[in-house]
Image (spheres, rainbow, N blue to C red):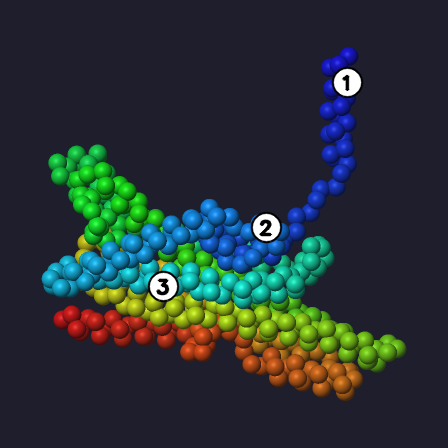
Amino acid sequence: MSVKFLKEKILSRRVKSLEQPKRKAYIVFEDFMQLPVYFYHTIGLSPYEMRGSKKPGLGFHILFLIHMVNANFVLAMEITFVVVSFRHNENFIDSCMVMSYIGFVIVGELKIVTVLLQRKKLTNLVRQMESIFPAARQEEQEEYNVKSYLQRCLRYTKGFGGLYVTLVLTYNVFAIFTYFLQKWILHSPHPKQSLPFTPIAPWEWRDNWKYYPTYFLQTLAGTTVTWGHIAADLMIFAVAIQVIMHFDHLTKSLTEFTVRAQTEVNGADKDLKELQALIGYHNKILGLTGVMNEVFGFALLLNFMAQSALVCFVGFQMSLGISPELQAKLFLILLSANSEIYLICKFSQMLIDASGSISFAVYDMNWSQADSRFRKMLIVLAMRAQKPVCLTATVFLDISIGTMSVFLRMSYKFFCAIRTMYQ
């Protein structure tokens, strides 16, 4: 009897579960930011205040402190190695390589500090973007085509993040992999121990147990600055793609605008009211771009300055006839640096195109049938849309796809200058 009762109960639960409609999964703002926030959290940093989440605890802050102290410790060792090498006129190629690491560490740490200093502004930017993000309704999200923009965002962020993860893993693992290969596979009588970023440490690490903790500290530092370096870029991409989504939605709304001034009673007033809402929406988007450039402008400037020097140093080292293994590692750095600058230029050009398309949408409207007040407001909207919106590296540089060629020319000039000095 009890077995029969249990069977009936299980069957009734299955029937109820089939009868209940499945919940629809809606895209939220955090879906765009999940990857950069994840990288920040792994180093103990919360880039902005999240709604509905608890404030970071003491352990979170201790984790961040450990990461930063260790990164600066390894940075000091790298600087020491370069100073000693130049003082004794030796290890020139190794010094150039370590100088590249020094630049990368400094940029990564400066980006982390920038996020800390701009945390309130970044939180304000996030709140503004959340306020105009499409509501959790199927019709509205389909109207904005949110799913397509999220897929595009994840495609760029995962691809770029994966490239830098591959880069840091290669540099972190290469030295110890070579050591284990010589020791356990090739059975070399004198396997060479080496560290991933600098051979200097305050203690003697060769041929004793201190090699492994020293190696771990350097790999941890490399991971810390890499996460800090790319998380800022990933956040820029995530914010930019959402701004592009809003510009495209505004363009679509203007293109599909139906003028009712001559077909409906009080149609002119209805047209004015709807147009005023669209102009207010445009003002909010422009406000977002201003805050976005204020928050990320310094990080963008760091990218162009540091990556230009990095490409120059890496290109110089590759021209010196080094080993194939080192050539492969340097090529990975070169690929990552150029990919980063290209993506920044591409996203800025996408912003320029998306913001500029509004003026064309205004022209394509059926404005000739509209009220005179409506047409005057359209003129103001079109004039404002003709000023392109783009990513700006503070006040020094307005970024577009043409900036990529400027970056390459500048890097090549630096490379030629260093090459001439070396010869």
Q: Residue at x 16, y 70 (%)?
A: 422
Q: Residues within 10 Å of mark 2 (few under 14, many from 20)?
A: few
Q: Amino acid at mark 2?
A: Ser
The quadrant where residue 397 appears: bottom left
**Horizontal side of residue 105 vs 253, given as left or right:** left
Q: Residue at x 67, y 60 (%)?
A: 134
Q: Which mark is residue 193?
A: none
Mark 2 or 1, nearer chain start: 1
Reading the image, the residue beneath label 3 is 107
Q: Residues within 10 Å of mark 1 (few under 14, many from 20)?
A: few
**Viewer-side label of 3, 2:** 2
The quadrant where residue 359 appears: bottom right
Instruction: Give residue 338's position: percent from left, percent from top.
Output: 36, 64
- Is there any visible trace of residue 187 in the rendered image? yes
Reading the image, the residue beneath label 1 is 5
Q: Amino acid at mark 3?
A: Val
> Is residue 384 placed above or below 304 in the rendered structure?
below
**Horizontal side of residue 189 vs 314, given as left or right:** left
Instruction: Give residue 383's position: percent from left, percent from top.
Output: 62, 84
- Is there any visible trace of residue 177 in the rendered image? no
Q: Amino acid at mark 1?
A: Phe
Furthest residue in direction right, as rendered: 265
Q: How far apart, in angstroms, are the residues tagged by discs 3 and 2?
A: 30 Å
**Horizontal side of residue 45 vs 282, given as left or right:** left
Instruction: Give residue 349's position: percent from left, percent from top.
Output: 49, 71
Q: How far apart, in angstroms, are the residues tagged by discs 2 and 1?
A: 44 Å
